[in-house]
Amino acid sequence: MAEVTSIAMQYIDAAMVGSLGANATAAIGLVSSTTWLFGGMCVSAATGFSVQTAHLIGAGRTGEAQSLLRQALMAALFFGLLLAGAGAALSPHLPVWLGGAPEVCPDASRYFLIYACSLVFAQFRQMSGGILQCSGNMRTPSLLNMLLCALDILFNSVLIFPARTLSLGSLSLTIPGAGLGVAGAALGTALAEAVTALLMTYMLCVRSQTLRLQRGGSWKPNPPRLRTAGWLALPLALEHIILCGAQIASTGIVAPLGTVAVAANSLAVTAESFCYMPGYGLAAAATALVGQSIGARRLDLAQRFARLSVALGVAIMTVTGALMFLAAPGMFLLLTPDPAIRALGVQALRIEAFAEPLFAVSIVAAGALRGAGDTLVPSLMNLLSMWGIRITASIALAPRLGLAGVWLAMCGELCVRGILFLIRLLRGKWLKKELIQNET
């Protein structure tokens, strides 16, 4: 349900920005792949600690899990500040490097700068939410992520648009507004992120029955725990660099096709989330269930949870893919008033619908493998798939078929990636990972 709420937030956000015109949509679309990259770095750092938490709780070692939480909070602060600084330094140059049109680059740069400044809060939200999930508490982070979506819509509606008057019969209502446009979209999301991060960290550190911090605990760095977090996080960070680097390269391939193509590509990615966000919800559940099962030395249970999660993901995303194919025109009618953008976007969505079942395999299987601590091999598979197939095919097809060629390349690559992950899951070598059992 949290993922469904997230989808609704993305649709409403896109519709708000889309009402400002093609340039506003293109400005956010131009840097969206880079925002995914930085967001992926936050997820990677969080995974290094959340997977260890699942194993320790599954093994009944809650005292060590509470000690690990202190290490996680210090790492979140350090890494969040590092990412924020890097993003702020990059913001003036990024839109130009990505080939953005002159009328798009200033808004894109402002948007990314504000986004970068919120990364400290994003890191705390991801860290706290991931640890809560892997402790077995899926409800609290899900509810708070729903709140994030609601706050994002509220803040954006005030910050994007100028003050306006709404007439209801004889009554008139003045709605406040800052009129900040694209910058308002970034600032609204940043404020929602900050509020949610503070609440998520409070629920973990104060209200969690299993992990809440106790007085007298040590904040001294624990090298074995930090090394394990690094071994888990680095391959996952590499995976996000590979995936988002390929997305950035795809943006560079799409940018010469024009502002309409960039806007249609960005909105099509948003619209596709209708299909794949439920898969990420299942992946989070699979990480927690597989991690705790392995911590408890129940390898048979871990394998059953992994296969069941993948099968459920395929079933759900097959249905949502079919719905997306049929509803694509209506979806784009909500996202933009521009008929040229709508036509291109509908074409892209209907191409992508055929990849959704195998895309589900790659998403949910990755979550299950992550719960076992298997992050390196999946990262290498993503490297082969994204750069060996998607980017190569996009470069070949874009000059001939335009945006449709880029999405055809994406569809084929996702099918190959799903097959690779299915083979990895069924072979079962990931069950033999050793993560926390020999540490003190």
Image (spheres, rainbow, N blue to C red):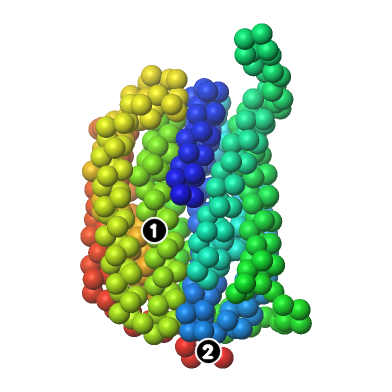
Report the amino acid beneath label 1: Leu
Q: Is residue 23 left or right of residue 291?
A: right
Horizontal relation, residue 273 to residue 419: left or right: right
Tell me the residue at 32%/68% (across/down): 306
Find disc 1 in the rendering and name its residue: 282
- In the foreground, 34 or 11: 11
Say which residue appears at 48% left-offset and 63% top-offset.
237
Residue at disc 1, secondary structure = helix
In the rendering, which numbered label is found on residue 103? none
Three-letter code, disc 2? Glu
| Residue in the picture at 37% in, 21% down | 340
Residue 396 visible: no
Q: Are marks 1 and 2 in contact (CB under 8 Å)?
A: no
Asked where in the image residue 17 lies, by quadrant, the reply is top right
Q: Is residue 224 above or below residue 327?
A: below
Residue 404 image point, x, y percent: 28, 34
**Is 239 left, or right, of 163 in this rendering?**
left
Give coordinates of residue 415: x percent, y percent.
24, 52
> Which disc number belongs to residue 439?
2
